[in-house]
Amino acid sequence: MRWLYHLPDRPPEVRLLRSREDVHSAAEVLIDGRWTLVDATHDPGLARAGLTVADWDGTAVDTALAYPAAGPLWRPGAGPEPVPNQGVTAPDPAGPNYRRAFNAWLREARSRPGPGTGARASHS
C-alpha cells in the first residue's frame, strides 16, 4: 500500500527542500480473510523523537500510519500510482544533505535515554 505524505519538520534541513511531499509504503497482510495494514516504519526508539510507532498485536486491526496520508491510499492495480512532486523534473540539490541530516537525526533520537534502550534517565 502506498500514499503521498509530507516529510516531518525535522531536521531543519527539510526546509531547504523544494517540496516536502514524498511517497510512503507499508505492507498489507491477509488475516482471517481481511487485508490489514501493517506499517512498521519506525522502531520504538523513534517514539522519543515524536514519530509514530505502530503497536501491532498480530490481529486483523490496522496499525497507525507512520505518516498521515496527504491523498488516497493506493493498492497495486488500483489505478495510477501516487507520484510526489508532480511537475518537478530535476533532482532536488538539497536532497542528499537532507537525507544525511535525517539519518543523523534518527541515530541521535535512538541514542537518547528512555524506554526500550536499557538506559536510565537521570533525575536531578
Image (cartoon, helix red, strand yellow):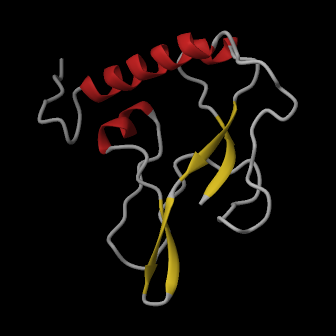
Number of marks present in the image shown? 0
- Residue 21, located in which quarter of the rendered image? top right
Quadrant for residue 32, please give it. Answer: bottom left
- Residue at x 75%, y 59% (from the top left corner): 72
Q: For the point 67% across and 15% down, which residue is it? A: 15
Residue at (61%, 25%) from the top-left corner? 9
For the N terminus, the quadrant is bottom right
Note whether residue 21 is visible: yes
Residue displayed at 39% across by 17% down: 104
Residue 53 coordinates in the image, percent (x, y): 41, 49
- Regarding residue 112, the answer to whether it shows in the image is no
Q: Is residue 54 left or right of residue 88?
A: left
Residue 92: percent from the left, percent from the top? 70, 16
Q: Is residue 71 above or below residue 107?
A: below
* Vertical placement of residue 124 versus 106, above or below: above
Does 48 sit above or below residue 123? below
Q: Quadrant of residue 77?
A: bottom right
- Percent of width and height locating residue 64: 51, 58
Q: Is residue 68 left or right of residue 85?
A: left
Residue 112 percent location from the top left of the image = 27, 24
Q: Give 122 or 26, whichever is nearer the viewer.
A: 26
Q: Nearer the viewer, residue 45 or 29?
A: 29
Vertical order, 31 against 38 (above or below): below
Quarter of the image that includes the C terminus? top left
Q: Farthest residue in the bottom direction?
A: 33
